[in-house]
Amino acid sequence: MLNLSKIVTRPVIAALALATVSAVAVHAEDAKPAADPKLADSLNPNDKTAEQDPALLKRDAAVKIEDGKYLDADGHPTFHVTQDGKMLDWYTYSGYRRYHAECHVCHGPDGMGSTYAPALKDSLKHLSYEEFIGILVGGKQDVNAAEQKVMPAFGDNKNVMCYSDDLYVYLKARAAGAIGRIRPSEHEDKPDAAKKAEKECMGF
């Protein structure tokens, strides 16, 4: 069986434990860090490629960067999209690629949903980071008299779990309208930290 401790980061491991015993979202109690003014352009007020949600853009704005990964005020990974939605951070770009390799068959292209599975661009408007990771790991069932929707567990799938943060930030960017239905071409270089994490997780 796959050793998740080698796949996910410390915050994700904590989230997985909580997700298995409770559906209650975890809220950070630490003081929120002050926003880095250099990251203010990630809000993309002039991007016309997507239906933007100003409240989500503000809530999910990057306030700091660590080893090439952008973080929001709660310390969770987030997107950093600039140049009117054309320049993506590495993790959002990677999330786009991973989503269309692993998720779009059920959830539709660009997180738009299908008759078979919900639109993740809408789900990520309210799902917390911990809830998202918990669902990836353990799966989810929505069963009632009208329909039966079952998402399988991906906890043992390295092609999903090694890139869980990437998927999360891509879908958060779609939810907030930071990027539209585009095939990204401009993106930041892959950080050394991402290369190292991928190598350790995938066992290259």
Image: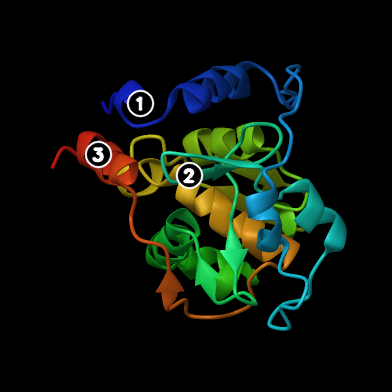
Q: Which residue is mark 2?
A: 69
Q: Is residue 137 left or right of residue 175?
A: left
Res. 46 mark: none
Looking at the picture, how far across and down is residue 25, in whole percent? 74, 27
**Is residue 121 in sight in this rendering?**
no
Q: Is residue 145 left or right of residue 135?
A: right
Seen from this angle, which residue lies furthest right?
Answer: 55
Residue kind at label 1, given as amino acid type: Leu
Residue kind at label 2, given as amino acid type: Lys
Looking at the picture, how far across and down is residue 157, in whole percent? 33, 42
Q: Which residue is mark 1?
A: 4
Looking at the picture, how far across and down is residue 112, in whole percent? 64, 71
13 or 46, which lies in front? Answer: 46
**Is residue 73 in sight in this rendering?**
yes
* Up-down relation of residue 50 to residue 152 (above or below): below
170 or 99, which lies in front? Answer: 170
Residue kind at label 3, given as amino acid type: Lys
